[in-house]
Image (cartoon, grey):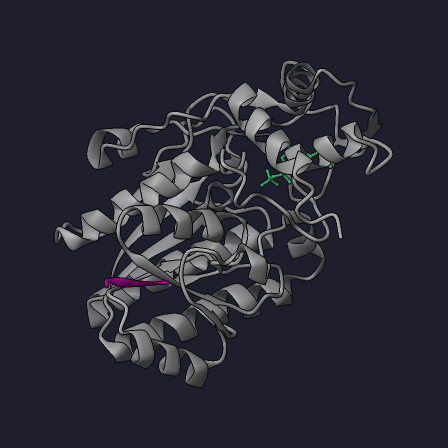
Amino acid sequence: MTHILVTGGAGYIGSHACKALAAAGYTPITYDNLSTGWQDAVKFGPFEQGDLTDRARLDQVFAAYQPVAVMHFAALSQVGESMQNPGLYWHNNVAGSLSLMQAAVAAGCLDLVFSSTCATYGDQDNVVLDETCAQFPINAYGASKRAIEDMLRDFEGAYGLRHVIFRYFNVAGADPEAQVGEFHQPETHLIPLILDAIDGKRDALTIFGTDYDTPDGTCVRDYVHVCDLVDAHVLGLNWLENGKESRVFNLGTGTGFSVREVTDQSAAVTNRAVPIVEGPRRPGDCTRLVSGSTRAVAELGWKPTRSTLPQMIGDAWRWHQTGHYDK
Ligand code: UDP
């Protein structure tokens, strides 16, 4: 069996990636400290509990499974939290990734697929956000991811660690078979919060800022379905297996939706009202983040099939209604 080490495999995106890897004939080995992930989301291969900063534990897992590649999802990913506690982000994301990359190199595992973010671009109005765009993150989360991208380039130069970097826009939706889905504790992401407000799990959805320079005053984001996103990761893995050069790919659809458009669509898809409260801006939020790139489509052959807003909300709603984590 071909083993792939999946850090963060118990989390939202990592668990979907494990499903996609298993479907493609790989055995995903989940390495996760369960700080934000869930052991019962590990359904498609072995589970190894461990922290990225625990080098001895990483060495042990590399030796036990001899993975041919790493998919690195494990990270803290909340913009707001990163502004309040940046040290956490530099320690967990940056120092953790350094430890992982050193362990991978020591084990001779020299292909790595990395989950980066459009937050590395920062707030750049009127700039097309393609992969050549300069990166000026405005929050510690984005800064931590940009630092890891830099480390990857240095590690390739020195040790031959080849990589595909995916800069995600806003990931949404869930496995259509509802085996895995999105669940964060506490939840901070827009669509799950809207669904919680719709079915009374919280009083209302607070819109963070209505005075942005956008058509309806709320922030604009490019939403991509988690299943389409993880399909791109399998293609990224194949890219490295085929000996192609290290490459950066944006993963977004190129279409932006405002927070209000997402709440309106959620009401339409679920046929339920969304209780809304208007609040102040959230520190660290960019006005507009929309991908201006088709590189993943052109070069990887990526074909997103589920990334329409109704489909993403519908799949998230189906997962939400399974009540998986209502414990
Ligand atoms: N958002 C909001 N209320 C919330 C959570 C998010 O208005 O309770 C907005 C947020 O300001 C951003 C968008 O929804 O413009 C997406 O936020 P999310 O946290 O889901 O993802 P991010 O863009 O931070 O990665």
Residue appearing at x 20%, y 47% in the figure:
239
In which quadrant of this rendering is ligand 1 seen? top right
Left or right, residue 28 beside residue 239 = right
In terms of image quadrants, where is residue 317? top right
Residue located 73% across and 51% down the image: 186
Please give left or right for residue 97 compared with residue 66 in the image: right
Kindly indicate the quadrant of the structure image that contains residue 259. top right
Q: Nearer the viewer, residue 61 or 215?
A: 61
Looking at the picture, does residue 119 appear above or below residue 214?
below
Q: Tell me if residue 4 is in the magenta stretch.
A: yes
Where is residue 212 shown, x and y percent of the image?
Answer: 68, 25
Q: Which residues are magenta?
A: 1-5
Please state if 268 lies on the left or on the right of 222 as rendered: right
| Rendered location of residue 74, percent (x, y) | 49, 60
Give the quadrant of residue 154. bottom left
The residue shown at (47%, 58%) is 9
Identify the residue at the far right of this view.
Answer: 203
- Residue 86's spot in the image, x, y percent? 64, 61
Magenta highlight on residue 108: no
Q: Position of residue 295 (x, y in %)?
A: 27, 32
Location of the N terminus (image quadrant): bottom left
Q: Is residue 121 above or below residue 295?
A: below
Which residue is more in the foreground, 95 or 125?
95
Front one among 327 and 174: 327
